Amino acid sequence: MEKSPLKKIVTRFAPSPTGTLHIGGVRTALFNYVYAKKHNGKFLVRIEDTDRERSTKEFEENILNSLASIGLAPDLEPIHQSNRGDIYKSAAEKLINSGQAYYCNCSKERLDEMRSEQQAAGLKPQYDGKCRDLNLKKSKDTVLRLKTPQEGTIVVNDFVRGEIEFNNCELDDLIILRSDGSPTYHLCNVVDDFEQGITTVIRGEDHISNTPRQIHIQNALGYPQLEYAHLPLVLGNDKKRLSKRHAATSLEEYKKAGYLDSAILNTLARLGWSRGDKEVFYMNDLIKDFEITEIQKAGAIFDTTKLDYLNAQHMANLSIDEFIISIEPFLKNLNIKLESHNKYKILIEAMRSSGNTLKEVAQNLLCYYQYPNYYDQTAIEKFIGNSTVILNDLNAVISDIDDWTEETLDKMLVSYRESNDLTIPKVNQPLRIALTGSTKSPSLGLTLSLFKKSDVQERIEKLIEIIEQDN
C-alpha cells in the first residue's frame, strides 16, 4: 500500500483515562509519533473518556504528563470524547436520514436466547436482523443499528499484515446509539478520526476485528479511507500479554526506577521493529530510520534485561553534567547532597557505571556519604573470616601515608601484598568491605582516595570492632 505524496500524514493516540499510562501504550504512541514526524505530519491525542464510571481526571493528567515528559507531546490540544456528544448524534442522524441505520427494539432476553440457540447450533453469535426492515420509530426501548452490507467483503490494507479480508456476512448490524441515546465506541472512533483529519491509524492488533466495522461506518458516512497498521502485542517472557505479573507495566514506574526516557523509547521502539544490528539509538535516529512496513507480525517480548542493557548504554553516553542533572532526584530521595563530597565529580565519574539505572547508581553512592547500611556477611566470611590481622596491618600502614593520592595508595597496596605474599583479593576485598559494605567499588586506590584518610581509618576500625564482637 503506497502512501499518497500529497497527503499530509496525521496520526493519533487515543487512550482511555481509566488507569496510568501503560508501557504498551507508550509503544503505540511512539510509533504514531515517529511515523508522523518522519513524513513531516502531525501527531494528535484524543481522550476516549466516555466511560464515565472508570475515567478520571487524575488518570488523564498522568497520561498527558507522561507523554509530554518522555517527548511525545501532541501537536494540537487533545480533544475529549465526553465533550462531543452532539457531533456523534449529528453523524447518527445522517445515517438515519440516508437509510443506512435503523431502530431496533429487541429485548435483552430475546437477544440472549437468540445467541444461545446460535451457539448450540455451532454458529457464530450475531444479531439476526429482525428489526432491519421494520422501520421502527425511536423510543426509550430502541437502539440504533448500522445496516451492515450482507454480501461481499471488506479488505483492510495493513502496513504490517498486508491484505486482511473479512466477509460481510460475518459482521452483524452493530449498535451505534444505545437506548439512552449515547454513542458507542465504533461511532465515536470513526467520527473523531474524520473530524481530526486522521490519515493513518496505528494501534494494537487487538483492534483488527474492529477495523471492518469501522470501515463500514466510514463508508456509510462518506468519509475517506484511512491507512492502517496493527502492531504486535507487547508480551511478557511467557509470551502472554504483558501484565504486572511479568514486570511493572506503567511508564511512571520505570521512570521512578531510574530509567532514562531515551532508553525507554529505545527499548519500546525495538518491540516489533529493528534496524539491522543497530541497538542503541535516539529519537532523531528513529525518525530517520523508521519504516512502518518493517514492523514484524509476531508478538514483541518486553525484556527488562534488554532495558537494563540499553539504559546503561544511554547513561554512559551522557556528559558528566547531564548525568549529574539526571541522577539528582534519586540522590535527593536518599538525602544525599552531591556537592557535600569534596571530590564529587570524580566520584560520579567513577561510579556512574556501577548500576543499570540511576536509582541503582544513587544507592551505590550512599556509602560515600555515610557509613554502610549493611555489610555483606558472605563476603566477610570469604575474605576476612575471624581474623582482623590484615585490616589492623592496613590501618597502621595507612596512618603513615601523608600523600593521599590514588597513585600513592596503589603503591602502598602493592607493597603490602608483596611483602606479606598475599593475593589481591585477600588484601583489597577486606578494605572494600570496610569502606562500602560490599566487594563492589572502582579500583581500590581510587576508592580510597575518594574518602578522607580519617574516614578510611574510622571505617576500618568499625569493621574490626564488628568482627571482634561477633567472635
Image: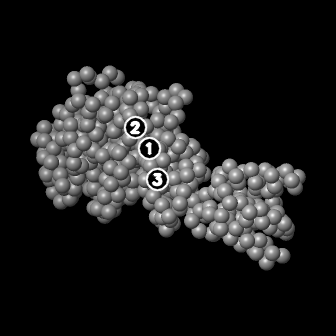
Give how far apart the Cα atoms at labels 1 and 3 are: 16 Å
Say which of 233 and 8 sits in front. Answer: 8
Q: Secondary structure under badge 2?
A: helix
Percent coordinates x, y for residue 66 in the rendering: 36, 53
Give how far apart the Cα atoms at labels 3 and 2 are: 22 Å
Disc 3 residue type? Ile
Q: What is the residue that sits farthest to the bottom in this orientation?
A: 469
The C terminus - image quarter: bottom right
The residue at the point 24 percent across, 49 percent down is 78
> On screen, 355 above or below 278?
below
Percent coordinates x, y for residue 64 in the rendering: 31, 53
> On screen, 368 above or below 274?
below
| Label 1 packing within 10 angstroms: few (<14), some (14-19), many (20+) | some
Q: What is the residue that sits farthest to the left in this orientation?
A: 97
**Camera sees residue 167:** no
> On screen, 86 above or below 375?
above
Residue pointed to by mark 1: 262
Please give the label number shown on residue 327.
Answer: none
Disc 1 residue type? Ser
Residue pointed to by mark 2: 283
| Label 2 packing within 10 angstroms: few (<14), some (14-19), many (20+) | some
Q: Earlier in the sequence, mark 2 or mark 1?
A: 1
Please give the label number shown on residue 324.
Answer: 3
The residue at the point 30 percent across, 24 percent down is 3
Disc 2 residue type? Met
Q: In this view, does 457 lie to the left or right of 316?
A: right
The N terminus - image quarter: top left
Q: In this view, does 17 lie to the left or right of 370?
A: left
Q: Secondary structure under badge 3?
A: helix
Give how far apart the Cα atoms at labels 2 and 1 are: 7 Å
For the residues bearing labels 2 and 1, Cβ distance under 8 angstroms: yes
